[in-house]
Structures are given as structure tokens and as C-alpha cells.
Amino acid sequence: MKAIFLFSLILFCASVHADEVARQADLIESKVIKWRHHLHQHPELSNREFETAKYVEKHLRNLGLDVQTGVAITGVVAVLDSGKPGPTVALRADMDALPVKELNDLPFKSTKTAEFEGNTVPVMHACGHDTHMAMLMGAAEILTGMKDKLKGKVKFIFQPAEEGAPRGERGGAEVMVEEGVLKKPDVDVIFGLHISANTDVGKVRYRHGGIMAAVDPFKIVIKGKQAHGAYPWKSVDPITTSAQVIMGLQTIVSRELRLLDDAAVITIGSIHGGNRSNIIPMEVTMVGTIRTLNEQARSHIYEALPRKVNSIAQSMRAEAELTLPLDYNYPITYNEPALMDKMLPSLIRTAGQENVINSKAVTGAEDFSFFQKEVPGIYLWVGGKPLDVSEADSPAHHTPEFYVEDSGMKLGVKLLANMTIDYMHAK
């Protein structure tokens, strides 16, 4: 009887808190939109988010929070202490934009340029990170105003370089973790979300387990023997060998993995060799990427890739050099199933049962996974697609036409706030 009473009390409190969060989200929606528009008009590339960081920092300091800057170069971290015992919940938003020229005709359109790999390029928030920051700024304002309802601490993490650090640099979530962002106070759980141009405004997509793929770039160098193109029998042909390697790698996915469980991808994205039509070159270099959604598939490909590459090269009398991973890699963005079960009622209370979608995984990657590698975490997709636009007609992420509605952000603000409060009270 006592357990039933306590459970009923928790549900009642969660409902009351959700109502208050909804009221506050309505009140500050215009501010969230204003922040988003400013950030969209002033995008900055990875590890160069200096003005973006100042803008976020000013807001957090105005809330009276304890703020740390310069984390992983430009990251901003703030802590809200309720003064009561309880867990530490981390909330994360990414800050960087992309070297993309915006083609949308918006009053807050980006016309900014910046230096990228030695060239001056246009810059745009073509993946929605402007909305992520605005949503987290909104959640910070609501949670600060509801401090008396909290138990424990909230850590707001504004992360640079999610899209990848510039060549020759390091950055992003991995560096933030190395610099102790999940410590002092020690984080118990972390929540993050991504706006989706392919999901209707008002809906949220979740998944137990892997929701976004691990990414493991690799390089293969095939070495043979150079010869005149008219006399191929005098060569050890690295081009023909490379062709067989490319086809052979596809059989790892199609014939060695149990694709009923999770998809996997092996892609060769670049191949270079030779300089004339009548010369068989000495070597060919290929660069590719692996995407996996569970550790078993990832481990299998790590074993199978050198097996395939070396055996095919040997059969052609060539030599192969494999570098795996190449220069970086991301873990699987993995929603711990027990935690996902615990937080699912929060999603339903916030968005409504009909708007909470059990989603398929995607083979894109997210460095939020570095946080989840250290502590349990949940990553969600929040709808930003206008209701009168079909999914087929909605511009993709990372394109010049990328667009998401301002109205989609209110759900994200509420989700971040409600998941934080519900987790604290459940603990």
C-alpha cells in the first residue's frame, strides 16, 4: 500500500511540474525564437564559436548560474545547484555551424563568411545547432526559475565542434570529456536532442539502444608493380586489386552480418591512383567509412576488414596497408534501454502519446556518444518540419535549403526541462 501511494504521489508531482513547465515555455517562447534568430544570423565554424560562446555565457550569467568558459576551446558549461541532495543531470547542446551558403529567403538569413581550410567560405547553421542552443537556453531559464522544485544539480553543456574539428585540431565532446566536463559535480545522466527537418513539429522520436551509428573512417593503400598499360602481365595491378577489394568489402555486410538486428554500412568515398591512361600505377589509395549500430557488428567489421583486404591483395600478388580507424572515430549513440524505459513517460506527458514515435535508427553519427560512453544518456529527435510540407519535399540537413520551424523548439525546451525534473524526482 505504501509503495502504491508513493508511486501515485510521484505521478501527481510529475504532472504538476509538467504543467508549470508548459506555462513557462509558453511565456518564454518569443525569447527562444529571438535567440535562435540571432544565432542563425551569426554562425561560426567548429572551434571558432567565440562570439557564440559569449552570447550563451551572457544569458547563463544573467540567470545567476556558475559559469565556466573555454572548455575544449570555446565550450561553455554552467551549473544550477538546487541546494538539495540529488543527482546531477547534464543537458547538452552543440554550437557549431557548417561551411554552407544559405539559399533560404529568411529575415534572419545568414550572410556570414569565415576561413575554412585556407579558403573564405559562406557559413550557415545547416543542421539546426542554432535551435539546439536556443532550446537549452530556454530550458536553463525555466529550470532556474523552478529551482525550488529540483533535487540535485543541473549541468548545462554548450559544446563546440560537433561537426568535427578543423584539420590538425581536436575538439568536440571527446575533448570536453577529457577536460572533465562530466566531473565536479559528477554527472549521473545526460540528455540531448536534435532538431529534425524530416519530423513534424510537435513530435518526438526515440529509440532503445543505438539511435545513431558509430563512425570509423579507414584508409587502404594497395601496392603493386608499375608497368606499361599495353603490357599488364608485367604489372601487379593495384587498380584491379582495389576494384576487387571494394566489391569484397560489401560482402562483409551482405553475407557476414545479421542484418535483421541492425544495419551496417561500409563505404569507399575516395580512390586515387595513377596519372595516365597507359600506365598501370604502383599504388592506389582508398579512404572510406564504417557505420554500425551495435558493438557486435562493429567488432566483427574490425576483424573482417583486414581479413578481406589482405587476402584479396595476396590473391592478386599485391600488398595492402590498412589504417583503421584513420584519424578519428565516434562510438554508437546509444540510449541505455533501462533509462529509456524510465524516461518514456516523460516524453508522453510532454508531447502526448500520439506524438511520441518509436523510431528507426539512422546511420549518421553524433559525438554526443562520447558523453554516453561515460554516463547513461538519452538522445532524441524533435520535430522541426512544417506540417504543410511533406517529408519528401523537406530539405535535408547539411544542405543550403535546410530549414526548421521556430515553433518546433517549444517541445524541445519542455522535454529538456521535464526529463530533468522527472529524473530527479524518480531518483
Image (cartoon, rainbow, N blue to C red):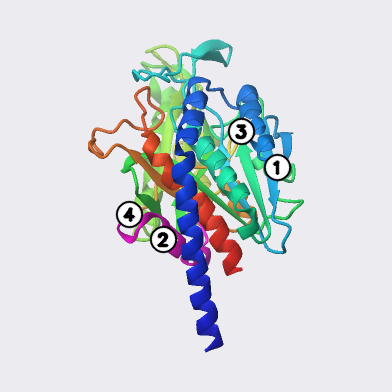
Which residue position holds label 3?
160
Q: Is residue 88 above or below residue 250?
A: below
Residue tagged 4: 355
The relative height of residue 241 versus residue 400 in the rendered view (above or below) is below
Q: Earlier in the sequence, mark 3 or mark 4?
A: 3
Contact between labelled residues 4 and 1, with CB atoms less than 8 Å apart:
no
Label 3 packing within 10 angstroms: few (<14), some (14-19), many (20+)? many
**Which is closer to the viewer, label 2 or label 3?**
2
Q: Residues within 10 Å of mark 1 (few under 14, many from 20)?
A: some
Residue range (magenta): 335-359
Q: Return the disc, 2 or 1, that comes first in the chain's sequence.
A: 1
Q: Earlier in the sequence, mark 1 or mark 4?
A: 1
Q: Which residue is denoted by mark 2 in the rendering?
A: 349
Secondary structure under tag 2 reads: helix
Find numbered disc 4 in the image and state the secondary structure of the residue it sits on.
Answer: helix
How packed mark 4 is, by other alpha carbons closer than 10 Å (few <14, some 14-19, many 20 or more), is some
- Residue farthest right in this picture: 184
> How far from the left and from the top, in percent, is residue 154?
65, 52
Please provide percent x and percent y for residue 259.
Answer: 35, 57
- Residue 330 in magenta stretch: no
Identified by mark 3, the residue type is Pro
Between 83 and 383, the one lying in front of the other is: 83
Q: Please, what is the three-letter code of the amino acid marked with disc 1?
A: Leu
Say which quarter of the image contains residue 103.
top left
Q: Residue at x 47, y 66 (%)?
A: 341
Q: Which mark is residue 65?
A: 1
Residue 340 visible within the image: no
> Label 2, label 3: how many angstroms apart (C-alpha)?
31 Å
